[in-house]
Image (cartoon, rainbow, N blue to C red):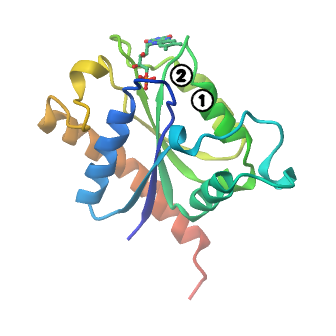
Amino acid sequence: MSKVLVISSSIRTGKKSNRVALYFENFLKGRAHDVELVDLEALDFPLFKERLRNLSSPPQSLVDFAAKIVAADGIVLVTPEYNGGYPASLKNAIDVLYEEWHRKPIAISTVSAGPFAGTQVITSLQFSLWKIRAWTVPAMFPIPNIEKSYDENGVPSDKEATDKRAAAFIDELTWCMDAKMKMTSPVK
Ligand SMILES: Cc1cc2nc3c(=O)[nH]c(=O)nc-3n(C[C@H](O)[C@H](O)[C@H](O)COP(=O)(O)O)c2cc1C
């Protein structure tokens, strides 16, 4: 059973993109993955001053977060779009780690309140993840009109179509997770 971390990036008061993270938590459980939802708001990291490995007394939440990234076979990263980019909370979480991200399969879901589904985030987020040597999965899960698309429990308004799209998205992540496992398991 593969271990998938779902990261909800928004720490905004009254945030809505976490609905998509909740959806993926449930969707992945339904497909027999070992799933954990990580909400960056709950972790409440301080603003970046140094990488974790250079901090003399890092907060326990940061140490735990790093361990979760290392242990995960893959990640579903849910991010809103703020002024054409991804939120500072996510940049903070990316920059504070380093080796932990290397070759980690990451599938990105972008979210916005309007019709463009947060897709302007993709270029800058993929670039940052590429720079840190993560493995971004070449599939997208863009969500427009979040208020109407999902309720606060993460239930999509059009469940059938959403599940179909999610299946294709997660299949790509699964392929990358499987490929990585084959490359890293000891030769028998
Ligand atoms: C600071 C800020 C900037 C935003 N910039 C954009 C934007 O560039 N494009 C867009 O489609 N929506 C933008 N929005 C609207 C967000 O897509 C919407 O608020 C969404 O719910 C944000 O996710 P969140 O609720 O999880 O924080 C912005 C919202 C905020 C608060």
The answer to which image quadrant residue 127 occupies is top right
For the C terminus, the quadrant is bottom right
Residue type for callout 1: Leu
Residue 166 at x, y = what percent? 28, 42
168 or 100: which is nearer to us? Answer: 100
Residue type for callout 2: Val
Residue at left 53%, top 16%? Answer: 82
The answer to which image quadrant residue 96 occupies is top right
Is residue 161 something one can see in this rendering? yes
Q: Is residue 164 above or below residue 75?
A: above
Numbered-mark total: 2
Local secondary structure at mark 2:
helix
Tell whether 85 sits left or right of 102.
left
Q: CB of residue at label 2: within 8 Å of ligand 1?
A: no
Tell whether 139 sits left or right of 186.
left
The residue labelled by disc 2 is: 121
For the N terminus, the quadrant is bottom left
The residue labelled by disc 1 is: 125
Residue at left 76%, top 36%? Answer: 48
Residue at left 20%, top 41%? Answer: 164
Residues at marks 1 and 2 touching, judged by CB atoms closer than 8 Å = yes
37 or 187: which is nearer to us? Answer: 37
How far apart, in angstroms, are the residues tagged by discs 1 and 2? 6 Å
Residue 185 at x, y = what percent? 57, 77
